[in-house]
Image (cartoon, helix red, strand yellow):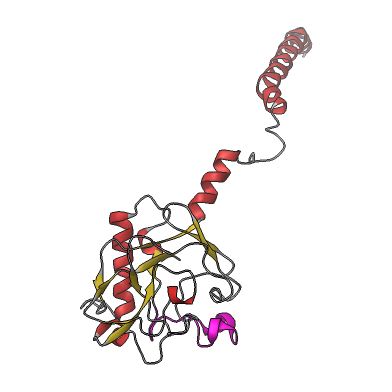
Amino acid sequence: MEDAFLMKNSKQPIFRKFRGLQNRCNRALSIFIIGPMLLFGQCSEAFPEMDGLDAVLLSNSLKKYLFATQSTYPGTLKRTTDANGIEGADAICAFEKFTNFSQLPGADNEYRALLVSDHRRACTSANCNSGGSSEHLDWVLTPNTSYYNPDDQFLFTTNSNSVLDLSTTPLSRVLTTTVAFYWTGFESTGDWRTSTVPETCGNWNTGGTGMRGDASTTGPTALGDFGQDSLCGTAHALICVRR
């Protein structure tokens, strides 16, 4: 018993010396690792804030763009595999995004046709002033959102109804300079209502006539105007927008 006691006590200076050395090492390691973090403010939160470049890249990746298709298409857009003409138009937009506009952010299938029929609707009243978003059906624009062309030039900002009154707030610039016309299907008043004639090429499937937008204007005629209907065998571009 006495021998055990003496052995235990004889080791105390060694243990104290080891513990002191360990504490000094821990303090040195803390200074080495934590010091620079405190110096540069890295311990203020679990994940440091993004720097300016990261913030810009994230912002650009979320921006909404639109483009006019580089190819033109007759108004009979429905393929045999499509449920309707709108689905065929959306497939064209995805294909054109992949083929001709791969530099734009977003997946190919995020880009949908700015086109209306019985299967896609913006408004049932002029500029959706009566029912707001309740008038939408599979609509492609979002509320209070800015849209840009492929050259990153600002085009317009939607209102809370996910449209804008082009008679009072025209586009900042034309939607495209690459084509003269594009299919839309809107009413001839250019107020985001679907044509009631109807001029949607039989829901972009069977033919007849279809409303087109005028690429040279920034007012309501950018969506449609009296006398701007075309036979559905005529080939026009589509406007594709990131949803």
Spot occupied by residue 187 in the image (x, y as percentages of width and height): 43, 85
Which residues lie in the magenta part?
Answer: 116-136
Instruction: Kindly report the secondary structure that dominates the magenta region of the rendered protein.
Output: loop
Residue drawn where x is 47% and y is 52% of the image: 152
**Which image quarter is the N terminus in?**
top right
Q: Is residue 16 above or below residue 239?
A: above
Spot occupied by residue 181 in the image (x, y as percentages of width and height): 34, 71
Residue drawn where x is 60% and y is 87% of the image: 130
Q: Is residue 120 left or right of residue 29?
A: left
Of 49 and 235, nearer the camera is 235
Spot occupied by residue 76 in the image (x, y as percentages of width and height): 24, 79
Count of numbered labels shown in the rendering: 0
Of 109 and 124, nearer the camera is 124
Q: Is residue 222 left or right of residue 29?
A: left
Would you say residue 132 sits in the magenta stretch?
A: yes
For this orientation, the residue located farthest to the bottom is 197
- Residue 23 sits in which quadrant? top right
